[in-house]
Image: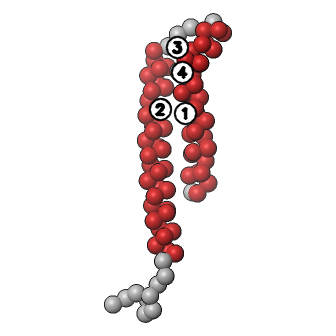
Amino acid sequence: MEDIVLLIPILAVPSMAAVLIAFSPLGKALAARRGAADPDPSLLVKLDEQENRLIVAEDEIEKLRERVEFTERLLAAPVPPGGGED
């Protein structure tokens, strides 16, 4: 499970960077230089959906990271004598 959680940011960051570059002035200039036509509107809709899914996944990863940090702090806390039971 940890491998999958680590793999998501590794894939998400370059993918997001590629999307941002593709729609930046630099990406548009490179497309114009290659003689590329305007993208198909249906592809833009799909790209927008994928971007939204990526944002949701990044939010979920951040929440999981916070939970792991909390759990690590909880486990690292010293246990009082008597096991902490009243």
Residue 33 in the image, given as x and y percentages of width and height? 65, 8
Q: Which is nearer the N-term, disc 1 or disc 2?
A: 1
List the single residue furthest toward the right.
Answer: 34
Q: Point out the residue furthest to the left here.
A: 86
Instruction: Classify 10 Å Cα crowding around label 1: few (below 14), some (14-19), many (20 and above).
Output: some
Q: Residue at (44%, 29%) from the top-left corner?
A: 49
State how far apart marks 4 and 3 are (Cα): 14 Å
Using the numbered discs, state the Cα–Cα distance from disc 3 to disc 2 in whole angstroms. Answer: 16 Å
* Nearest to the observer: residue 35 or residue 4: 35
Q: Which image quarter: residue 24?
A: top right
Q: Which dot marks residue 39?
A: 3
Q: Indicate the amino acid at tag 4.
A: Ser
Query: Which one is earlier in the sequence, the residue at label 3 or at label 1?
Result: 1
User: Residue lying farthest bottom?
Assistant: 82
Residue of label 4 = 24
Q: Which residue is mark 1?
A: 16
